[in-house]
Image: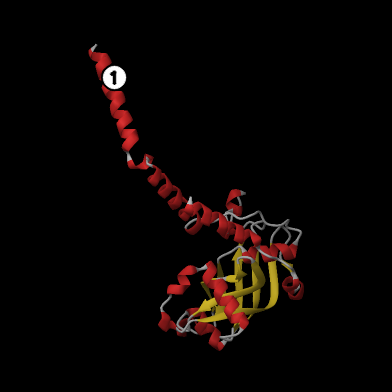
Amino acid sequence: MKWELSYIVLVLVLYVECKWRPEYSEDHKRWHRRESANDVSTRRPYHVADPPDHTKLIPMARYVLHNTNWASIATISVLPAIEGFPFSNVKSIVDGSLANSTGIPYFYMSPLDFTAKDLTKNSRATVLVSLEETNYCEQKGMDPEDPRCTRLMLSGKMKKVKEGTPEYTFAKAALFERHPAMANFPPDHNWFVAKLKIAQIAMIDWFGGAKYIPVKDYLAYNYTGLEMLQHAKNTHNSDVT
């Protein structure tokens, strides 16, 4: 009898604990799902639809640029200790709105930044984006240097987009859409929108060395970039459920 009574008490304690622990409440489960979704979308590589076949060079190039959020940008340094050396920096990037890819890299820059200072003396730059920024390469067990983990290198001259023009309005809206934190950047930093006027496109997306893509054909390709739009919708739906 004593053993049976102890067993009943233990069952009741476990039931009450499971019933009323916060992590089992509906509110907590919703909070936990929301936090998990935010963690995936903002801290980890995100997943979008798989890239095109590696033989489709122009679709692949446009896909990689549109589906990455940041780029490594190489310029010629004006820093006194390394003047004339190559210098690399990380910049947030878009090539248009989530649903309207242009293939042109746009940036939001301040004259106080390393890159902007370099570009005032020499506007030549190379922008590199990698499929490693999504979770595709990791899922496939590819090292970031694996040729199948596509790397796209766009070289050309950087230029300011004239404020007040339709292109400026479009590019700034696209930048703020993809990078909402930009709206809270310090207002006294004289921010401006810049774009790369592409002179050469090199890409490594398979074995056998780099491929070179005609700039005219690359820009003319009709690519909507719906993968990122769908990703944004999925993230939003996860946040509100």
Residue 3 location in percent, x, y? Answer: 25, 14
Tell me the kind of residue under disc 1.
Tyr
Q: What x and y, as percent, mark residue 186? A: 41, 78
- Identity of the residue furthest to the left in this view: 2
Quarter containing the N terminus:
top left
Task: Say above or below: 236 vs 15.
Answer: below
Q: Is residue 102 visible?
A: yes
Q: Nearer the viewer, residue 104 or 201?
A: 104
Viewer-closest of 26 and 218: 26
Q: Is residue 77 visible?
A: no
Q: Residue furthest top?
A: 1
Residue 136, image x, y percentages:
61, 53
In front of the other: 187 or 236:
236
> What residue lies at 48% left-to-right and 53% top-to-bottom?
240
Q: Residues within 10 Å of mark 1 (few under 14, many from 20)?
A: few
Which residue is labeled 1 in the image? 7
Looking at the rendering, which quadrant does residue 218 occupy? Answer: bottom right
Occupied quadrant, residue 21 = top left
Query: Residue 172: where, in percent of width, then height?
Result: 55, 76
